[in-house]
Image (tube, rainbow, N blue to C red):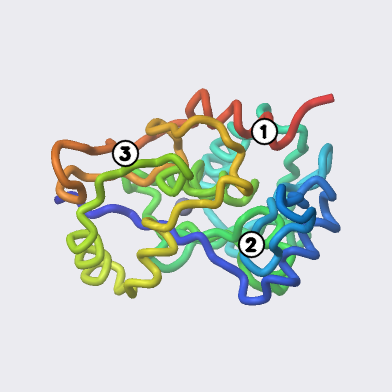
Amino acid sequence: MKIIAPCKLIQPEDQLASYQAAVEENPQNEILSSQGGRNKRSTGHWQKFWASGRELTISFMEVLPVDLQQRIEGLIRQWEPSTNLTFKFDDGVAGDIRISISGNISSSYLGTDALLVASDQPTLKLGIDPAHSAFDATVLHEFGHALGMQHEHQHPSANIPWDMPVVYEYYRLHTQWTKEEVDENIFNRIDASTSLKGAYDKNSIMHYPVPNEFTIGDWEVAPNTRISKLDRRNMRKAYPKP
Ligand SMILES: [Zn+2]
């Protein structure tokens, strides 16, 4: 089985601070529950999109070769036309999004959760060799998280026939993930109230590849390499242009 370049969506420890940062940044992040009016802030029922029309600054933690930096910038800018944001790359400041190329697990905070991270720490890590065939897709995927997009394989209506013991064992061996970490990043479904409620999309760049060995029966998702049509539609819903 081909080794999957894993991605971890980092959950902040302080859920109340996460909620407050999200709603202060963009009041539309507050989702009113149908029962009772108030959202359930203790269980993460709010969105984490940046303020409409905002300039989002992006910086690198390390000095990178110019061609690599331009390649990453070009990939990130593929998202820009589907948003109402302006991306500004500026290494003279600590950006809203701070990218580090380090380690062997790629990770990102979800949208406005990046506001909770100390300014000398990265908010997005690319833990993958630039020569790896999945590097470009990883940049697109991680920046999707930075814009507030969650994992597509955890879509409320994803019905993936996971062979759970095989998946637990794979990630235990290859990434030393605990059962809880596998649950958080792979199996747990996203609450419908925090998702964009678009249809489940196997072609989403936010979907993990799913090897056939991970599922019961004949079911797989090949590695997606580009932003899908539905990804763009969802991003436009999150960041509608005037
Ligand atoms: Zn991810």
- Which disc, if any, is residue 227? none
Q: Nearer the viewer, mark 3 or mark 1?
A: 3
Tell me the quadrant of the picture where the C terminus can be found.
top right
Q: Which residue is mark 2?
A: 44
Mark positioned earlier in the residue sequence (3 or 1): 1
Q: Residue 226 or 151: which is nearer the viewer? A: 151
**Mark 1 falls on what kind of element?**
helix
* Picture mark count: 3
State the image coordinates of residue 55 (x, y, percent, origin top left). Answer: 81, 44
Residue kind at label 2, given as amino acid type = Gly
Amino acid type assigned to the residue bearing label 1 in the image: Glu
Going by the image, does 151 lie left or right of 213?
right
Q: Marks 2 and 1: which is nearer the front?
A: 2
Q: Can you tell which mark lies on residue 223?
A: 3
Using the image as rendered, state which of residue 103 and residue 218 is in the foreground: 218
Query: What residue is at 62 percent from the left and 51 percent from the top?
Result: 146
Q: How far apart in space, not on screen, are marks 3 and 1 (Cα)?
A: 23 Å
- Residue behind mark 1: 80
Q: Earlier in the sequence, mark 2 or mark 1?
A: 2
Tell me what residue is drawn at x 60 percent, y 32 percent: 234
Q: Quadrant of residue 63?
A: bottom right
Circle 3: residue type: Pro
39 vs 205: above or below = below
Image x and y of residue 69, in percent: 56, 47
Mark 1 and mark 2 in contact (Cβ < 8 Å)? no
Quick one: SS at disc 2?
loop
Q: Is the residue 62 above or below the residue 201 in the image?
A: below
Query: Image check: 68 left or right of 22?
Result: left
In primary-sequence order, the first of circles 3 and 2 is 2
Crowding at dot 3, Cα within 10 Å, few <14 / some 14-19 / many 20+, comes out as some
